[in-house]
Amino acid sequence: MRRLLLTMLLVLSWLPAGAAEPWEMLPPTPAPMPAERSGQVSANGISIYYAVYGRGSPVILLHGGLANSDYWGNQIQALASHHSVIVMDSRGHGRSTRDLRPYGYDLMADDVIALMDALKVPRAEIVGWSDGGILGLDLAIRHRGRVGKILAFAANTVPSGVKPDVEKNPTFAAFIERAGHEYQSYSATPKQYDAFVEQISKMWADQPNWTDAQLKAITTPVLVVDGDHDEAIKREHTEYIAATIPGAGLLILPNTSHFAFLQDPALFNFAVLHFLGDR
């Protein structure tokens, strides 16, 4: 896949004085969608929640840290007419449980493989947001035979790729607060959100920590995507990832942030469908 730099331009509507910019908005989490199949799978030492929608070649959607699979509602609707769309709640997130092992991206990527094995999915495309994008790259590094194309949105490959004090950004702080309420609604341990955040924060402090050589060894087609106003990921780091993975594409979505799939789902979905070859 040839190196590709896509710049998509969008004309902003006139906004009244004092109105929030599009990238400052945090639209509601989509409501849970009725699935053709859903349930819990005991795999890799935990219980993993999953749901399957549509028919066709499999695409797995991997959500970001602190979130859950409901966040993909707008993308499920767009993809289900072309693909068998599989969503899952990551270890300790949403309706999935965790064990005593410390959080780690390798462990969480192995959860994805364990679910694929349980569902008898030999190979799938991956669309990941934030931690989910990191998991997509982890799969490309460690399980390349199990994945096809990978769209990594708002991912980082070293801890220094994350902006300092991101949790103080108003939009991101609102997400953290919302995620806490959702955790209480879904988790088997609803009163342990603070402990959950503390544990996963330890992973974020040290992981991922991939070398240039590891990224250069990726042979899977990768599209690196981010919003032009991402609160969490440094633009230069996003550009570095795309420049280092052989043949990777780079797409910067205008007027959006770390939550582009909620802020402008039509644009985000068009990019996903185009990358997967459905447009």
Image (cartoon, rainbow, N blue to C red):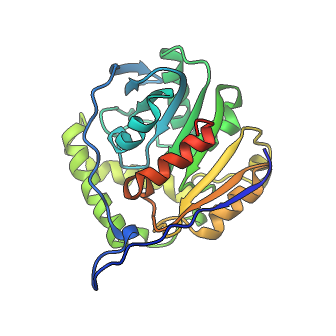
Residue drawn where x is 62% and y is 43% of the image? 275
Q: Name the side, left or right, on which 123 lies relative to 53.
A: right
Residue 195, image x, y percentages = 31, 50
Q: Name the side, left or right, on which 149 lies relative to 116.
A: right
In the picture, the quarter occupied by the N terminus is top right
In the picture, the quarter occupied by the C terminus is top right
The tally of labels here is 0
Q: Name the side, left or right, on which 35 lies relative to 142.
A: left
Residue 148 shows up from this direction: yes
Residue drawn where x is 25% and y is 52% of the image? 180
Residue 103, image x, y percentages = 47, 43
Residue 47 shows up from this direction: no
Q: Name the side, left or right, on which 170 lies relative to 234.
A: left
**Residue 22's image quarter?**
bottom left
Residue 238, image x, y percentages = 63, 62
Residue 271, image x, y percentages = 56, 49
**Residue 78's image quarter?**
top left
Camera-side residue: 73 or 132?
73
Residue drawn where x is 35% and y is 45% of the image? 71
Camera-side residue: 151 or 115?
151
**Residue 159's image quarter?**
bottom right
Residue drawn where x is 71% and y is 40% of the image? 221
Camera-side residue: 213 or 29?
29
> Residue pushed farthest bottom?
17
